[in-house]
Image: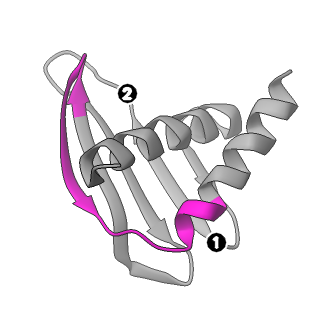
């Protein structure tokens, strides 16, 4: 899978997690997720940091509709943690 495709898949999972949590953010022992919904001229935005290193952003995506720009994508174990958080959010919503 191409890195950009993977980043967009992870963005979708992270938005699901953030919306299930508070609607805009999620924090646990592994991840910090901040989601900003589009308002007027501002596009959607998503930032993820590893909780153990708040200085290292591992994913940053901005988008409007189908047009997306992956600003930062650093793969790693946080992807597994995000997938687990997304699976839990989907189970909780069901």
User: In the drawing, does residue 81 fall left or right of residue 77?
Assistant: right
Of residues 86 and 28, which is closer to you in this image?
A: 86
State the colouring used for the structure image. Answer: one colour
Of residues 45 and 87, which is closer to you in this image?
A: 87
**Residue 46 visible here:** no
Which of the numbered marks, if any, corresponds to residue 37? Answer: 2
Of residues 6 and 60, which is closer to you in this image?
A: 6
Residue 13 percent location from the top left of the image: 55, 39
- The residue lying at 51 percent from left, 54 percent from top is 33
Residue 40 percent location from the top left of the image: 20, 15
- The residue lying at 58 percent from left, 40 percent from top is 18
Of residues 29 and 82, which is closer to you in this image?
A: 82
Q: Is residue 1 magenta?
A: no
* Mark closest to the chain's N terminus, 1 or 2: 1
Residue 62 percent location from the top left of the image: 23, 39
Residue 46 percent location from the top left of the image: 36, 45
Residue bearing mark 1: 30
Query: What stretch of residues is rendered in magenta?
Result: 63-81
Q: Is residue 70 magenta?
A: yes
User: Is residue 78 depicted above or below 54 in this figure?
Assistant: above
- Graded by Cα atoms within 10 Å as few (under 14), some (14 to 19) or many (20 or more), the crowding at tag 2 reads some
Name the element at disc 1: loop
User: Is residue 25 depicted above or below 81 in this figure?
Assistant: above
């Amino acid at each position: 899978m191409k890195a950009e495709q993977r980043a967009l898949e992870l963005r979708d999972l992270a938005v699901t997690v953030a919306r299930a949590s508070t609607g805009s953010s999620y924090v646990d022992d592994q991840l910090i997720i901040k989601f900003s919904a589009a308002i007027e001229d501002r596009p959607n935005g998503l930032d993820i940091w590893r909780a153990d290193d708040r200085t290292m952003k591992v994913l940053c995506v901005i988008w409007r509709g189908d047009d997306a720009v992956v600003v930062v994508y650093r793969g790693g174990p946080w992807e597994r943690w995000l997938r687990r958080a997304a699976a839990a959010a989907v189970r909780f919503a069901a």
